[in-house]
Amino acid sequence: MMGWQLLVGAVVMAGCVTDKPSQVDKTNNWAEQRSRMVRTQIQARGIRSKLVLDALGSVPRHEFVPQSVRDSAYADSPLPIGEAQTISQPYIVALMSELLQVEPGGKVLEIGTGSGYQAAILAAMGVEVYSMEIVTGLCERAQETFDRLKIELIHVQCGDGYRGWPEEAPFDGVIVTAAPDKIPEPLLKQLAIGGRMVIPVGPFNQDLKVITRTKDGFEEESIIPVRFVPMTGEIEKQ
Ligand code: SAH
C-alpha cells in the first residue's frame, strides 16, 4: 500500500517537472507503451486469447485515467480514478476478459463501470456491454469517455448493480469489478445456460472466481487471490 502511494506521489511530481511534449510525440509514445504493456505484462503472464490481446493493444488506456496519473496509464498496477475508486491493473483486466470466454456478438453485464476501461476492452472484442455504476460522477464520466472515443457497443446505467439489468437478461457473461462478500443472487439468475460470471469474492483479500451456469445448476472455480474495492449499496444490507 505504502509503495503504491509513493509511486503515485512520484508520478504526480514527474508530471510537474516534465513540460508537455508535443501532441504527436505523446500519441506515438502511447502506442509504443501499449504494445510493450501487452508483451511484457499480458502475454508474458500467459494470456493467449487473440481477441483479448488485440483489444488490450488497441484501447487507449490513457484516455480512461485522470490527467494526474496519465503518464502511468500503461504501468503494471492499478491507478486511482477519483471518488476513492481504482482502474484495475492491465493484467487483471485481460485475465477477467479471457475468463469470460465470450465471442464477438455476445452480451455481457458489467457491475462497476468505474473508468469504463474494462467495458471498452470487451467492446473492442466485439461484445455488447451493459454496464452499471453506483457512483454518479464516475458513471457520467465513463459515458462521456465512450462518447468522446465513439464507442457504441456499451450501454451505461447509473445506479446500484446488485439487481442487475433484468430487461436485458440473459447474458453470456457477467463481470463484477467490485468485491461482494457473497455472490448476489439476482446476478446469477441473469446468466444464460453455459454463461460465465467472473467475480472477486471476499472482504479484503478476495478470490477471483468463475461461476458457470449449467443445465443443472452452477459450477464454481477459484482462480487467483485478488484485491478489489468493495461492492457497496444493497449488498451491504444482505
Ligand atoms: N471496471 C472498472 C474498475 C472498477 S472499480 C474499470 O475498468 O475502470 C469498481 C467500481 O465498482 C467502482 O467504480 C465502484 O463505484 C463500483 N461499484 C461498487 N459497488 C457497486 C454496485 N453495487 N453497483 C455498481 N457499481 C458498484
Image (tube, rainbow, N blue to C red):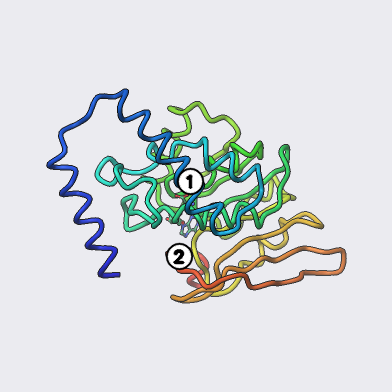
Q: Looking at the picture, how far across and down is residue 134, in whole percent?
A: 45, 53
**Residue designated by label 2:** 228
Q: Nearer the viewer, residue 214 or 222?
A: 222
Work out whether 211 lies above or below 122.
Answer: below
Residue at x 73% of width, y 50% of height:
172
Q: Is mark 2 within 8 Å of ligand 1?
A: yes
**Residue designated by label 1:** 158
Compare marks 1 and 2 and give the one earlier in the sequence. Answer: 1
Residue 83, which numbered label? none
Residue at x 63% of width, y 39% of height:
125
Q: Secondary structure at mark 1?
A: strand
Amino acid type at mark 1: Cys
Residue at x 71% of width, y 48% of height:
102
In the rendered image, which quarter is residue 122 located in? top right
Q: Is mark 1 within 8 Å of ligand 1?
A: no
**Quarter containing the N terminus:** bottom left
